[in-house]
Image: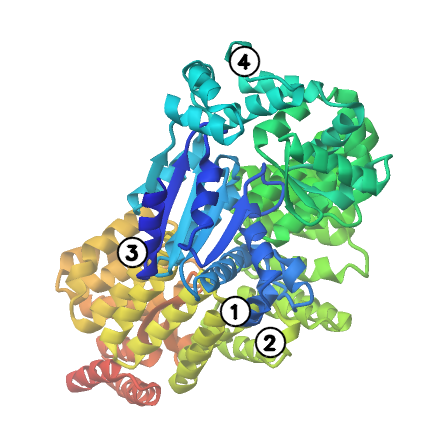
Amino acid sequence: ELARLSKLAGEAAAGALRMVAIEGDAGIGKTRLLAEWLTGADPATVLWGRCSGARLPFEPVVQSLVARLATDPGAVDRLGPYAGTLAAVLPEIFGDADAPSTEPEYARASIFRALAAAVADASAGGVAALVIDDLQAADADTIDLVRFLVESLGGERLVVALTVKEAEGDVVSLLSELQRRGLERVALRGLSDDEVAGLLSASGVDADHAHAIAATLRARTAGNPLYVHQIVGEARSAGEAVDPEAVPIAIRELLARRVAALSDRALETLQMAAAAGERIEVDAIAACSVHAPSEVVATLEELARRGFLADVAPGTFDWVHGLVRDAVVDATPPTRAAALHLRLALALEDTAPAAVAAHHYRRAGRPGVAGAILHGLRAGWHALEQSAWTAAARELSAVLDVASDPDERAAALIGLGHADRGRRLTGDARRHFEDALAVARDADLARRAAEAVLGLLGGGGRGVGVDLADHERANRLRRALAGLADGDDDLAVPLLAELAVSLVLTPDSERERDALTARAIERARQHRDAALVATALVGRRAALLDATSAVARLADADEILAMPRASLRPERRLAALVSRVEDLLVLGRSGEAERAAAAALDDAAAFDHPYWLWAATTWSALVSIVHGRLDDAERLAFEALGHQPENPEAVAALGVQLVDLRLFQGRAGEVVDLLAAAADDNPHIPAYRAVLALCAAEAGDRERAADAYEHFAREGFANLPRDSNRFLALAVLADTCATLGDRDSAPVLAGALRPYEDLHVVLNCFGGGGAYWGPTALHLARLALLTGDVEAASAYSRRAAEAARSIGSPLVADRVATLVDAL
């Protein structure tokens, strides 16, 4: 087994990540095997962490990095660009760093990438080993992080070593997935008769006696080396020879017998240590003990000599094995255990992480309920800030189990809703937000009600209550607003913005939307909070979907970008940058749009978040389409998908850009079937059917084009919703109308397009670059020519030619030239 590990280290030295899982029963020697390997010369750097029931977010990786970075100032300096992000999970190391204020849904990817950078740094000086001990105890957050590290560190000189026993559920899935990526699995067996004899001899048993009893002892212990060690320890404590016939059937029975034989003071200290957890800090035990600190240290040293503990560092002891701690826990009466946990909670609550204090208060029973709620809420919300969704849900669920106060229950339910939203458990998230709203309203907790409504409906209309009708959304938002006091601007501003968004598709609501967004911005400015003003301005953009608002939207984006960086969440600045690209293209200012796209890419790379990398790259692709660089555009479109390959919205956006490319390449026929399927699968997005009509017409399939086109024409185009797709849909239907020669519908489409006649047709696809279809003047010129108005057609053609020249689009210029020839 050691040779296999050394072979993997040699392969990693060539610059390729290697993985190994050491599997076997408790006490079989998994951890000891890795320890023996790591004492050799193979890995230059060791990162060692353990899953201990995962009370802390991303526990094993964070634990291993704290141990390394605490002794390596050079690594801390090298990780400076990530300091703000790492401060969220490594406050011991980066506590004074300026952590960016980032929404949790964006923070998770940034945290994962920062942790990956810290692990990669460990391999800079040679092969590094990342050891994750007891993987079977990992929670879903840790499993996601391990998966990410393996995917992102494939070229590093790194060995990822896992120890596993009795894997279940997500851990089994992870191991299977990693095995397909090259994970080597090493299953440890029990010792043979000769190996048991050798272990006995090395432990001080007379060689002849060791060989005489080896076979019997191996049969009783299944060759488990921990079991054999503990048998030797018991015999030594009793001053007797090892008697294999007296060995209990199970190791836990043997350990319980050894614990019971301890003195009162040793037993009390050992029970306190067991309550404290996996790692035993002398100061913490001394703070809870009735004995003097020197006596506590002496007792811990005695327990180490007896084979219960290991003295691993100054002031720190560890268990020789988790089974030993389990045996001590089992032997501690429940009432005594509760009292020990209460003493630990009181001693640690001001210095330990909130999750640790909450754990001890929970284990203290009724006397610890108040502390369990207080620290459980803190731990849960802190885990949310770290995007550790599973850890947050665990802490907040525990609060709900014991809390009766409405405010505490509402806070826990809201946090659970956010945790479920992060885990994409939309139904559970909605239920928790709804329950929180009910609790808050019953208890007249206006702020909690507002928080619950924002959790349910927030996110620019893309919350978990997506199926609520617009009027129901508006009613809930209005009611939440009505309950807030004058000083509650932090909640009132986003509620006003969301209310404006909920009215986007409501007829005759433009004046109300304008009033709502104006109120939001006014209140934010009065609050003198740049971040709140940015929230209001972003909200106004969501309420001004129509392209005719491009100038106003551009002014809002420019105001956000003029704010000090330190006052903004990175995603707010990125939202302003990518929206600026869209508005500049709509206005025909492609040079500025290209510079804005480059700035967005730079910011997205610094933020290191997949959504924003995707969004910025798609807008760069669209700028390339505008400028006729179709090969570059296609490369960028696929590069963008690489940032979010499993996001269905990113997949749909790639399809939209490919359709745009094929249209300009004269290959529209290649995407007709794709569009037909999209139109059938998404009847709520009629723009798909509109583009299908255009592509079929461009491909010469007039029958299919007419069928898709008539879906709108027979309704007088009234079935085109006033959403962000409307402008593009009108433009492509105008082109189809001209190709099919539908003179009767031409005036209707021309009237609908005239408000946009000075603009370029640009589609925003889920926040990323979607499609470009030239200046509106070109489509108006074709409609005018169809109706026989040659003068108008000529005027619009001249405007289209100038617009194509100004925006720098040779492909559109060619289409205009074709139209001019027809004139």
Image location (x, y in percent) of residue 31: 48, 39
Q: CA distance from mark 2 to mark 3?
A: 36 Å
Above or below 448: residue 578: below
Q: Is residue 797 left or right of residue 277?
A: left
Residue beneath disc 3: 689
Q: Earlier in the sequence, mark 1 or mark 4?
A: 4
Q: How is the image coloured?
A: rainbow
Q: Residue furthest top?
A: 245
Residue pointed to by mark 4: 243
Q: How many marks?
A: 4
Identity of the residue drawn at 47% across and 70% down: 604
Quote the CA–CA distance across marks 1 and 2. 9 Å
Residue at left 79%, top 21%? 335
Tell me if residue 819 can be seen.
yes
Classed neighbour count for the residue bearing mark 3: other residues with Cα under 10 Å, few (<14), some (14–19), many (≥20)? many
Residue 238 picture quarter: top right
Question: Secondary structure under badge 2?
Answer: helix
Please provide percent x and percent y for residue 770: 36, 66
For the residues bearing labels 3 and 1, Cβ distance under 8 angstroms: no
Q: Secondary structure at mark 3?
A: helix
To which residue does mark 1 refer? 575
Asked if the residue at tag 2 contacts the one at tag 1, i.e. Cβ–Cβ closer than 8 Å, the answer is yes
Horizontal and vertical percent position of residue 383: 63, 48
Residue identified by numbered label 2: 560
Q: Residues under labels 3 and 1: Cα distance?
A: 29 Å
